[in-house]
Amino acid sequence: MQLIMFYNRCSAEFCGAFSDEKTTQDFLNIKPKTMSNISKETLVLKRMIFAAILFSSLSIFFLSCKTNSANATSDNKIDTVLTGTVTAELTEAPNVPKPLTYTSPKRVMVHLETIEKVMPISDSSEYTFWTFGGHVPGNFIRVRQGDLVDFTLTNSPDSKNSHSIDLHAVIGPGGGADATATAPGQSTHFQFRALHSGLYVYHCATGPVPLHIANGMYGLILVEPQGGLPKVDREYYLMQGDFYTTGKYDAKGLQAFDEDKALAENPDYVLFNGRVRSTTGPNALTAKVGETVRLYVGNGGPNLVSSFHPIGQIFTKVYMEGGHEINTDVQTTLIPAGGASIVEMKMQVPETINLVDHSIFRAFNKGAIAQIKVTGDENPSLYQKIKK
Amino acid sequence: MKYFLTIFFVTVFFWASDAQKKAVVLSKEMVTVPAGNYQPFFISETNKPVQVKAFRMDEHAVTNLEFLEFVKANPQWQRSKVNRLFADTNYLRQWKSDLSIGESNKKIYNSPVVNVSWFAAQAYCQWKKKKLPTIAQWEFAAKGAPKNLKSPSLTEYILSWNAKPNPPFLPNVKSTYQNAYGLYDMYGLIWEWTSDFNSFIGSQDSRGNNEVDFKNFCAGGAINVADKTDYAGFLRFSFRSSLKGNYCIRNLGFRCAIDL
């Protein structure tokens, strides 16, 4: 298996020989001397072929050296043998991909597209969102600990700007950002091993990073532990984010990003899933009395931390900061900017649960409310309103 | 009937191809950008303020019609003949064919040519006995104060351009603002190639540790930046850092310069 990995790495190097930055730089050096007119293309071509041959022979050398030492080690007790290839199911919030059923590591193909798009941010206001997949938050990605994630980032040809991705689940340069600076209409590609289970934020890491995040470029990736998470009845995806617009909350028309408000950390909107009322009223999440609901909750920021609280409920379980430490019976849990949390609740009585950022002006005036509509039979022994 | 149709189509064909022939290539001036100091976007041991010597620069970006003249004179740069190493599959994809921009694309005859690679841009400028401007030249020239801008500040104007999705037809050159040096559309129309577009990513000898490590940038990227509130500058340098010489992009064109 290691052999396969290294083989891939080598062949990636070989393919990249024409296009990586080093080579482009070399071109820049060569160009003024050899390309004084276009008829000398052939000379450059020859040089490139020579470079390619050199690269491939180096790669083979690298391969033969590395295989011996690689066999001797194993990373973090993770089974490194891959047992096939699957394409990750990607979902749009509030939906979550189905729990994974496989029990040994696979190569998981993930393909995300960055899309710049005007969408409503409230009933009267529009905003040019920058997104992973055409919506805020970006697609939910679900993999298993030990999987080798084969990641392709495509930037829509309609984009004005370059984009990239930093997945907090990645151990490697820039969390993937180093490999994914992607110009409009282009694609980039890298692989990483999902070494640690947990719920992780991903976001764009192209400069100016705060602007890309403020425009909505974030989402969640869940790395299931080996054996998966305990089964629950329903799973949902929520992600908080703060937005800074030139006009006030719900001002009419297309709103531009306001740099001064962003630097002052004074947002006009604090939202779940990128829009006022994204998850309330007819769009509310649903559940039935007796069910256990699990929420994967992220906070894209860019600035605010969330005091996440369910009005009329108690979190029976909180996987604190999306890790392994479980707290029980929690009223309000803190979700840092660039962090996440897994929370669970047992539905006891019919009600509408308001999920809020309990920094309460944000919920009252800036949009930070999501709802779960719980239907089923009343249980007066647990709760009843007493009429006079 | 058949004859009639044939005559009709032939007439339409000639009329259509005539329209392109009749279209006038805008006469283009070059303007002088006076010498001055350019403070690089990144500050480092190797990126100190540089003296930019006076140079001449095209007053507007190269248009589709201008580029058509070039590919007519240099067949190896026609869409179907170009070497893929020098231009990817998006090369001139907005055109109807090798030697025709297309009647339905009339609106973009005098718009900047886009979907052109660095190699193609370089070859065009050489053909005109010019060259692509360096990053320092381009950035210095773009700093010229705007003359007729409606926006309250240049940065706001640029950011609002960044926030708008690409229009279906790119506006014509000289349709935005002119700056103090006489240059049109330095911002707000397209991105533009420079000769050394990604040289700031690392020094040519990357074995040392003195490179400006722009790519590991989350917050780290801001450390070496002179003006951390220059979000428009960040977008421009990020865009450049993601480019490769054969990329052809829908909103990336160029203009040429001459050293004095």
Image (tube, coloured by chain):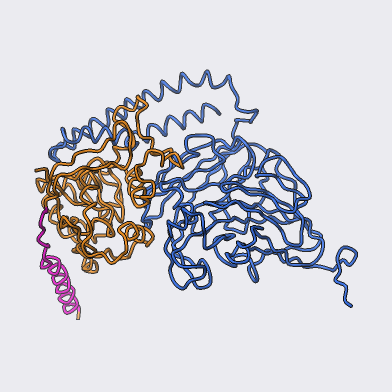
Residue visible at 51% across and 30% down in the picture: A4
| Quadrant of image for the C terminus of chain B | top left
Q: Which residues are magenta?
A: B2-31
Residue farthest along the front direction in this orientation: A264
Q: Position of residue B238 (x, y in %)?
A: 36, 46
Drawn colour of chain B?
A: orange
| Quadrant of image for the N terminus of chain B | bottom left
Does the magenta stretch mainly form a helix, a strand or a loop? helix
Q: Is residue B156 magenta?
A: no
Q: Which sits in the foreground, B69 or B12?
A: B69
Chain rendered blue = A
Residue B80 shown left or right of residue B22 in the figure: right
Q: Is residue A147 above or below residue B248?
A: above
Toward which corner of the image does residue A360 lie, by quadrant? bottom right
Residue visible at 72% across and 48% down in the picture: A318
Residue A296 shown left or right of residue B6 in the figure: right
Q: Which sits in the foreground, A145 or B30?
A: B30
Q: How many marks?
A: 0
